[in-house]
Image (tube, rainbow, N blue to C red):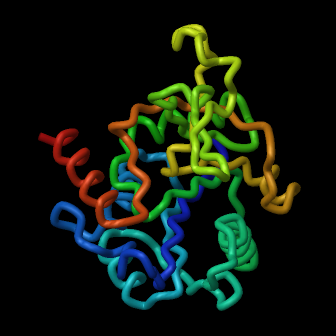
Amino acid sequence: MGKSIAIIPARGGSKRIPQKNIRDFCGKPIISYAIDTAKSCGFFDEVMVSTDSEEIAKIARKYGAEVPFMRSEATAGDHATTEDVLLEVLDEYKKRGEEFSYLTCIYATAALIDPETMAEALKIMEEKEPAVVIPLIQYSYPPQRCFVIREDGSAAYKNPEYTRTRSQDLEPLYHDAGQFYVYNVRKLIERKGTIDDDYYPIIISEMDAQDIDNLSDWEMAEMKYRIKNR
């Protein structure tokens, strides 16, 4: 396998949950779990944190990640995308004489990732060579039977043709687990960070991921973590 880097984006500002990326999670800063997972899976030549915060950088280094440079002002704002951050990191490493074949972006709040899942995703990338390997979760309830609220306040099926279809006869649909993404660096750069196809999935359970947008989500993530590790 070619050289591989793990990049953990961790911006300092967080409006909904203050200091979200370094907030205590079951006894440790939450970013430490992403760092531990990346280091324990044994695939990465470099595990780095991209941040604009000296406090986050200090904690990241304490738990074994590299922070060789700080994030630029351009990628520290609210409108910068994750891909903007990744391309900036790759460009900065290239200036320093280091290039990578594969890149894994791990979200700083992804505390539920199993190292085995990440290792499997990296093997899929090596074998299949898609643009991206992405963890997916199957919807627990068929989205084909969703309701919409009309202007008059009444509710209606969005797709009434599926009203009487048995759940087992509906096509399974999946959503992004919001944990990590394994990129083919060449394809990421060629497409300038905009990848609309060429994905390969790795299916995980709802117990192995939790999107964290508010404190209730945070508590749910901690509960899942305790159940998984009891």
Q: Position of residue 87 (x, y in %)?
A: 73, 68
Examine the rendered structure and indicate whether residue 161 appears above or below residue 218.
Answer: above
Examine the rendered structure and indicate whether residue 137 appears above or below residue 73.
Answer: above
| Residue closest to the eye, 11 or 55 | 11
Examine the rendered structure and indicate whether residue 89 appears above or below residue 40.
Answer: below
Instruction: Name which quarter of the figure residue 147 lies in.
Output: top right
| Residue closest to the eye, 11 or 63 | 11
Residue at image position (39%, 58%) is: 34
For the image, the number of numbered tags is: 0
Residue at image position (43%, 63%) is: 213
| Residue closest to the eye, 116 or 156 | 156
Instruction: Name which quarter of the figure residue 162 lies in.
Output: top right
Name of the residue lying farthest toward the right: 190
Q: Where is residue 70 in the image (x, y as percent from the top left)?
A: 56, 86
Residue at image position (50%, 44%) is: 177
Residue at image position (43%, 91%) is: 54
Q: In this view, does 197 lie to the left or right of 67?
A: right
Q: In this view, does 116 lie to the left or right of 190?
A: left
Q: Where is residue 196 in the image (x, y as percent from the top left)?
A: 80, 46
Q: Is residue 218 left or right of residue 49?
A: left
Name of the residue lying farthest toward the front: 152
Looking at the figure, which quarter contains the N terminus? top right
Q: In this view, does 134 lie to the left or right of 66?
A: right
Q: Position of residue 127 (x, y in %)?
A: 67, 28
Looking at the figure, which quarter contains the C terminus? top left
